[in-house]
Amino acid sequence: MRLRNIPGSREAIAANRWCIQEPEGAKGAWKDIFGNGNPIHIEIGMGKGQFLMRLARENPHINYVGIEKYSSVLLRALQKMEECPLDNIRFIRMDAEDLCLVFGQGEVGRIYLNFSDPWPKDRHAKRRLTSRQFFSRYQMVLAGSGAVEFKTDNAGLFDFSLEEVGAAGWRLDGVTRDLHHDPAMGGGNVMTEYEERFSAMGNPIHKLIASR
């Protein structure tokens, strides 16, 4: 379970140089924020930041933005950044529903969704990050060649996601129900904290890649 209540976490985030304090002002201005015109990749629900930070280290010519709703979780990522600073990464504390207020049309090259909240009740389906409602948001910010990558160990959520890709008018570019034993899709895979934990328990990891 994610930590959500650490006293002083919001104050620490507000004072942190790696965190965008007024994200709505970043829309259309990401080149100025990073000081270059490199592609922007984002992770929604980035947790403690392990996945995003490794990508940033391995791909210095790509800019990364981590989005996390919970202050206490984001604080863990910011603490890691202080230990090993990276110029090509920034963080935002915000709800994913506000994505289009922060990124302009075509401003994002790739979106990563890793082990997202399954929102198991049917009435909450539209809150799932792979719902057709969210795919419509992604379409507004992704570049023409952009894609969404989604990983989970939740088979039910994965089945739902596969259906929503088609319902949203997107296409599937890659699908596997056992990522760690799939030579085609598993090559170069970067694991998250949750992925390491779930795979160690023997849970197969599902992944899809979708584009317009």
Image (cartoon, rainbow, N blue to C red):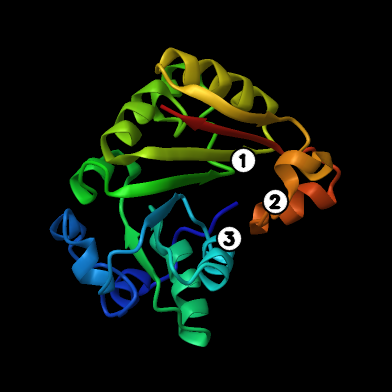
Residue type (three-letter) at the residue carrying disc 2:
Glu
Identity of the residue drawn at 80% across and 39% down: 182
Identify which residue, 14 or 27, lies in the foreground: 27
Q: Which residue is mark 3?
A: 51
| For the residues bearing labels 2 and 1, Cβ distance under 8 angstroms | yes
Of callouts 3 and 2, the N-terminal one: 3
Of labels 1 and 3, earlier in sequence is 3
Q: Are marks 1 and 3 in contact (CB under 8 Å)?
A: no
Q: Residue 82's spot in the image, x, y percent? A: 46, 84
For residue 95, side relative to residue 166 (left or right)? left
Q: Residue at x 40, y 16 (%)?
A: 169
* Residue at horizontal 34 percent and vertical 63 percent from the top: 38
Local SS, label 1: strand
Q: Residue 209: x percent and y percent?
A: 56, 34
Q: CA distance from mark 1 to mark 3?
A: 12 Å
Bin the neighbour count of mark 3 within 10 Å (Cα to Cα): few under 14, some 14-19, many 20 and up: many
Of the two numbered discs 3 and 2 in the rendering, the one whose residue sits closer to the viewer: 3
Q: Amino acid at mark 3?
A: Phe
Q: What residue is shown with label 2?
A: 195
Identify the residue at image location x=50%, y=71%. 76
In the displayed structure, 152 sits above or below 64; it is above
Residue 4 relative to residue 135: left or right: right
- Of residue 196 and residue 2, the one placed in the foreground of this image is 196
Q: How many marks?
A: 3
Residue 89 image point, x, y percent? 40, 69
Q: Which amino acid does the dot numbered 1 rest on?
A: Lys
How crowded is the residue under tag 1: few (<14 C-alpha within 10 Å), some, or many (20+)?
many
Check disc 1 and report the residue beneath it: 151
Secondary element at image label 3: helix
Left or right of 1, for residue 102? left
How many neighbours does mark 2 have within 10 angstroms: few (below 14), some (14-19), or many (20 or more)? many
Disc on res. 188:
none
